[in-house]
Image (cartoon, rainbow, N blue to C red):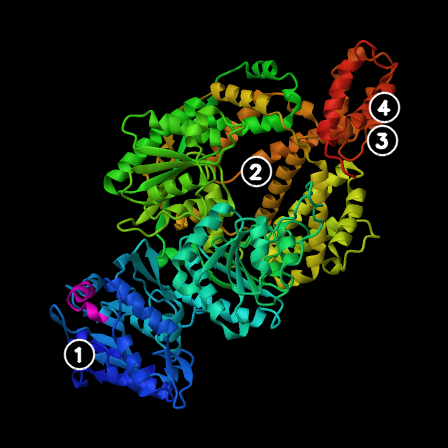
Amino acid sequence: MTTEASIEQATIDWLTDLGYTHKLGTSLPQNNTEVVLTEPLLQFIEKQYPNIPQEIQKLAVAELSNNVGADLDHRNRDFHLKLTKGKEYAYEDADGQEKAVHIYPIDFEEPDNNVFWAVNQFSITGKNKRRPDIIIYINGLPLVIFELKNWYDDNTNLKEAYNQIGHYIKDIPVLFEYNTITVISDGNEAQHGMYGAAIEWYAAWKSINGTDTVQDDDFQMHTLLFGLFPKERLLNYIKNFIFHEDHNGTLIKKGAKYHQFFGVNFAVEAAKKSVRPFGDGRIGVIWHTQGSGKSISMAMYTGILRSLPQLKNPTIIVQVDRSDLDTQLYENFVLAKDLVGDVQHAESTDDLRRLLSTGAGGVIFTTIEKFRLKQTTEQQLGELEHPILSKRENVIVMADEAHRTQYGLLDGFASNMRKALPNASFIGFTGTPIDSKDADTQEVFGNVIHVYDIKQAVDDNATVNIFYEPRLAKLHLWNEAIDRDVDEIAESAEDNPSLRWAAIEDAAGAEDRVNKVAADILQHYTNRTNTLKGKAMVVCMSRRNCVNMFEAITALEGCPEVAVIMTGNISKDPISWNEHLRTKDATEGMKKRFRNPEDPLQIVIVRDMWLTGFDAPCVHTMYVDKIMRGHNLMQAITRTNRVFKDKRNGVIVDYIGIGDNLKTATQKYTGGGGHGKPTIDIEQALELFFNQIEKCKTFIPADINYTKWKALRDADKVLLVKKAVNSVIKYDEESEDFMIAEKSLTGLLSIVKSQPAIQEFAVDVLFIQHVSKAVRNAKSVKTSRNEQKEKIKELISQSIESEDIVDVFAMAGIEKPDISILDETFLLGAKKEKDGLALKIELIKNILKDEIKLRLHKNIKKYTSLREELEKVIDRYHSNALDSYATIAELVERAKELQHEDERTKALGLSEEELAFYDILAAKKELIKVEGPIQDIVHGVVKAVKSNLQLDWAKKENAKAAIRLAVKKELRGKISIMQLNEILQEIMLQAEGQFGEWSA
């Protein structure tokens, strides 16, 4: 039978295999009330520093053996700083010359210069006499403790080993002044942690070299020893991956988990090869999922970079895209001061420029928008280009959430940053997968260095599992006369699609529905907290909905303290919102309150704030009443996945129907550690991709040569794009076809991005995407009628009522399970293999959606019924929660609608842009005085409009007057003079809606 002793012996055997010397504690000549072996320590210092006086050598031993601090944690920190940063001593040499020496008790650069002992049966006397199973001594310093239990004893487990460490801390605290790592094992499991941490923070070490597939069925002690305890690796961990956070005098000691250790070390090696002048400045990307300690990894990485001699005191710029992320990450770096040193925060653009213009190294925090150009003032002219702030090559930019703001390399803040720091190197850290259809990540940062996805984090207990509970608040429209009521608010509202759709999207904020959702939330939260104390977040679609939800839920009996967390605009927001608008300091105070599990603030209601870069481990439930997708959705729900005391899971309660979006996003997070095979036939996708490139290229004139795109100046790129846009946008149908084709191309790119065969087409894709974006901007419709918009929103709210909250599982007639977002059943739809036909259906669906969106603003008269569109939105809202995927039937119906419009346009002999004006004149055909088809008049009207278009014409009264005059001339004699102005007004509204953003 395997005993505790045989587990101990196996551990010693493996340590011996790693080059450690086994020593019996009973053989050591040591007073057992002390734990430092001073003789080996003195021998090491004499060997390392032979030329310093003997009294300095002995003084160093004495100071390393005695630590300063009011309690154990402070004495442990004092020792750890001496251990890792060394201590400086001044002395006089034989000639009386003043000298100084920096003494380290360990040679971190040359592991073989140190003495590694694995000591067992070493008794220590304190409050009680105790004998830890194994102590790792390095140069006489007791740095690692092992507590082992019998694998085959039914009455012992890992918790017993942990509890025994707790007794050692009470009985022989002197041993823990020097402790760097504590290991506990019951034979089957083996975990490492910091001596004072709760047991949930201990973790297995699941990889020997960081590149192997993680094995859950290995012998954990073997993996831990050969993964962490090779001499060079252990010294690296002790020096660079342990630190103490100071929380107002209370110290929390933290150490890296295996994914942080390997990820950061791989990134360090990548930096050595990539930082200029050694490489091209693209270090790579680290993807460590939300909640797995990404900010700590960034701090550890920063500390190592600052200590690398080849980087010569580098400047590390930590760049984020929003101020809330900036604050959170900055606070984490300040807490990791022992590793990173002092951290500077750029408070403004001028402050950032001042910090970057100095020659010294250091750590600088900034949001990317501080790389802005200075605008013209009365005192100075504005900037056309960002000035160079530093030409140094040892500037490294660490971008948090790498894929959000780093791709505007043609223009914008990212471009300005690279002009300011032309020789900087870049590394991206992200908690969400990089979406390759959004940007060329490799082009910006380099290759993915290390991946730690959400599934592995849950398996490792680095985060808790998240469960999904769908609940549906059904809506229906009771106001049959809503169209008439809307027209009373704004006669021309029917001609303003932007106004209509903005109002429709707010339908879920109807008062009756919000009241019922609020009651359901409170009941659900009360039931959940009866068995597990914790806090909750409610996510709403708009700030108005947040306020409405607050008023509804706080009016209920038994409601705990609730707060709305949102930004404000006091010049525009209702006065009644004032209680929810806070200063920056007050918001920070709310953060501290909400993070404190004992504080009575139990629920916060948010729209966007605190959904990223905010950690409150006591949050265990999120109520979602806002449609979110992709990384925004995953970042939001992972607010609930932090490890905390007895919390075993987070729960997402869905009132709006994010189930499909959650499946899709989760699948991206869990695909074989981030590197899983595509779930479609990649060869077929490649063929479609190549065909789609050729289709897109047919829209680009042959005389436009963009083959040297990446080598062109920004100015030349702009001109080249402009030339292509001018050609594409001449014909309405052709420009729409081009945009649809590019959308399909970009969608396929996300599937085939990892295939080497597409690299030679990178320039084609880049140019096509630039042209498509420019065409979209030229054809987009923008409007601003806030007062009407708010009145119509209010009308919608009053016109929609809600049925009772529906338990979706109960509706389906099945027993309600807890469905984890990582569960195979939940992911079935996302993981289902798709054949070629399914792939084509997906593409057709996306193309149809895009085509409908593109056509929406083309003919305002086609979308005159607010009631009809509201019913469509409500239907979509319901099906979003109840259907897994859009049905083919819906696609066919949508396609028929579009085909009908195409047929009508063709039959009338008009272009689609002319059809809208035809509908205006056809509706008033009794006013037309001349014989012949209306189409003849339409041709002339559209020609009159387009011939007089100029840049920003809708904002210039003289330009609008010129178009008005041209249309009047065209209609004179054809329309009754008394009604001419009435029709002219409608034509001008349509012209503004259709050509308002004209730029070609």
The amino acid sitting under disc 4 is Ala
Q: Residues within 10 Å of mark 2 (few under 14, many from 20)?
A: few
Magenta-drawn stretch contains 425: no
Up/down of 996 relative to 455, above or below: above
| Coordinates of residue 827 in the picture (x, y in percent) | 44, 48
What's the magenta bit mostly, secondary-structure-wise?
helix
Depth check, mark 1 against mark 3: the one in front is 1
Secondary structure of residue under mark 4? helix
Local secondary structure at mark 3: helix
Q: Name the residue tied to disc 3.
A: 947
Amino acid type, callout 1? Gln
Q: Secondary structure at mark 2?
A: helix
Q: Please name the residue shown 37% across and 89% down the image.
A: 50
Element at badge 1?
loop
Distance between the alpha carbons at the discs numbered 1 and 2 = 73 Å
Q: Earlier in the sequence, mark 1 or mark 2?
A: 1
**Percent coordinates x, y for residue 928 in the rendering:** 82, 13
Mark toward the start of the polypeptide (2 vs 4): 2
Mark 3: give few (<14), some (14-19) or many (20+) Cα within 10 Å: few
Q: Say which of 624 and 843 sits in front.
A: 624
Q: Please name the amino acid that badge 2 sits on.
A: Ile
User: Do the numbered discs 3 and 4 sit on residues whose CB atoms are within 8 Å?
Assistant: yes
Q: Which residues are magenta?
A: 165-175
Q: Disc 2 marks which residue?
A: 888
Instruction: Return the residue at label 4.
Output: 966
Distance (Cα) linking label 4 and label 1? 101 Å
Give the residue drawn at x 83%, y 52%. 702
